Amino acid sequence: MELNVEKGLTYVSEWVVTEALSARNMGSGTLDVLATPALAALMENAAMNAVAQYLPEGCTTVGTELSIRHLRATPVGQRVSATARLVEADGRRLVFRVEASDGAGPVGEGTHTRFVVETEKFLGKLKKEASL
């Protein structure tokens, strides 16, 4: 299965940093700032949504690789956004450039790879593996 999407396709996801997204709450640190795992999730969300409307019926994407740098802390209460830009589409493999920023400037950057999968087939394989 191949996805017909153009390089350069972009999507922006935006969140307000809450206590639930803090390093202290997520267990990745002791401060009330945006946790790196939350930043990663925001970046993945932008990439997922960038191609969602172009997927064949019954398909979704799954993240398989994420390489990011968390450049600066964002305090609880501040808005943070992540932009995903499609830089490579090779069959079912999609590679995105991801960048995040808040009101004070850049927060994170990196790359993210996703694969297009058939939802039922993917879940069926998981169910089969779980029963082994």
Image (tube, rainbow, N blue to C red):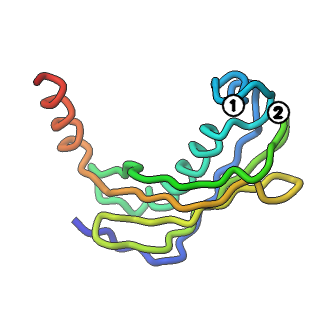
Residue 92 lies, in percent from the top left, at 29, 64
Q: Is residue 111 above or below residue 129?
A: below
Residue 53 lies, in percent from the top left, at 44, 59
From the image, which quarter does the N terminus lie in? bottom left
Q: Is residue 56 above or below residue 32?
A: below
| Left or right side of 91 for 17 | right
| Left or right side of 106 for 111 | left
Give me the residue at 16% from left, 38% from top. 125
Give me the residue at 35% from left, 59% from top. 55
**Between 79 and 99, which is closer to the camera in this rendering?**
99
Q: Is residue 81 above or below residue 9?
A: above
**Circle 1 sits in a helix, a strand or a loop, which is it?**
helix
Give me the residue at 28% from left, 70% from top. 91
Residue 109 lies, in percent from the top left, at 65, 60
Residue 16 lies, in percent from the top left, at 76, 39
Q: Is residue 49 visible?
A: no
**Circle 2 sits in a helix, a strand or a loop, which is it?**
loop
Asked if labels 1 and 2 touch by Cβ distance under 8 angstroms, the answer is yes
| Left or right side of 127 for 67 | right
**How dense is the environment of label 1, judged by Cα within 10 Å: few (below 14), some, or many (20 and up)?**
many
Q: CA distance from mark 2 to mark 1?
A: 8 Å
Q: Amino acid at mark 2?
A: Val
**How dense is the environment of label 2, judged by Cα within 10 Å: few (below 14), some, or many (20 and up)?**
some
Give me the residue at 53% from left, 62% from top. 111
Indicate which disc residue 21 carries: 1
Mark with earlier residue (2, 1): 1
Q: How many marks?
A: 2
